[in-house]
Amino acid sequence: MKRITHFSAVLAVGLMLALAGTSIVATKSGRAGKYLTVEGKVLAVNTHDRTLLVSDTWSNTLYLVSVPAGKSVRITFGLNMHSAEPQFRDVHQNDRVRLRCARIQDRLAQLNDDHRVVTVTAVN
């Protein structure tokens, strides 16, 4: 009798942990596709459209980042990297930047040299 009670308790706890793990994974996967961190080298700055073309440090991905007015940019290496809160006007070509972005499209284009181009918008 004691063995059956112990086995049913272990089974109930195991089932509860499995269901809790599934619900936690489901909530994280919904958030995972919404925001991302773009970190890389600025290839081009378009001041008219307020966009940056950033080559990702860790993958063969190019990000076309739209920076709304008033949003700050984290410059990790460059002329204005010691500014307290650098703005879009402080970013120059060949600076290293880190931006928190919201994904607009999954993939804009695939280039011949296996680079993907993704459109994102900077958020704080």
Image: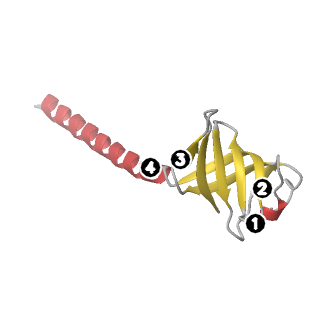
Question: Please, what secondary structure does the residue beneath circle 1 have?
Answer: loop
Amino acid type for the residue under numbered disc 3: Arg
Which of the 4 image quadrants contains residue 13?
top left
Q: Are marks 3 and 2 in contact (CB under 8 Å)?
A: no
Amino acid type for the residue under numbered disc 4: Lys
Q: CA distance from mark 4 to mark 3?
A: 22 Å
Please identify the residue farthest to the top as the structure is shown. Answer: 3
Q: Are marks 2 and 1 in contact (CB under 8 Å)?
A: no
Q: CA distance from mark 3 to mark 1?
A: 23 Å
Side of 84 relative to 14 (left or right)? right
Side of 23 relative to 6 (left or right)? right
Q: Which residue is mark 1?
A: 48
Q: Where is residue 97 drawn, in percent x and y?
A: 75, 50
Judge by depth and name the residue closer to the eye, 75 or 3.
75
Amino acid type for the residue under numbered disc 1: His
Q: Which residue is mark 2?
A: 45
Q: Residue at x 36, y 43 (%)?
A: 21
Q: Is residue 87 visible?
A: no
First along the sequence among labels 3 and 2: 2
Which label belongs to residue 114?
none
Q: Nearer the viewer, mark 1 or mark 4?
A: 1
Side of 101 relative to 84 (left or right)? left
Please identify the residue farthest to the front as the structure is shown. Answer: 112
Q: Where is residue 101 drawn, in percent x and y?
A: 61, 56
Question: Please, what secondary structure does the residue beneath circle 2 have?
Answer: strand
Q: Which residue is mark 3?
A: 107
Judge by depth and name the residue closer to the eye, 13 or 1.
13
Q: Are marks 3 and 1 in contact (CB under 8 Å)?
A: no
First along the sequence among labels 3 and 1: 1
Q: Quadrant of the N terminus?
A: top left
Judge by depth and name the residue closer to the eye, 22 or 37.
37
Q: Which residue is mark 4?
A: 28
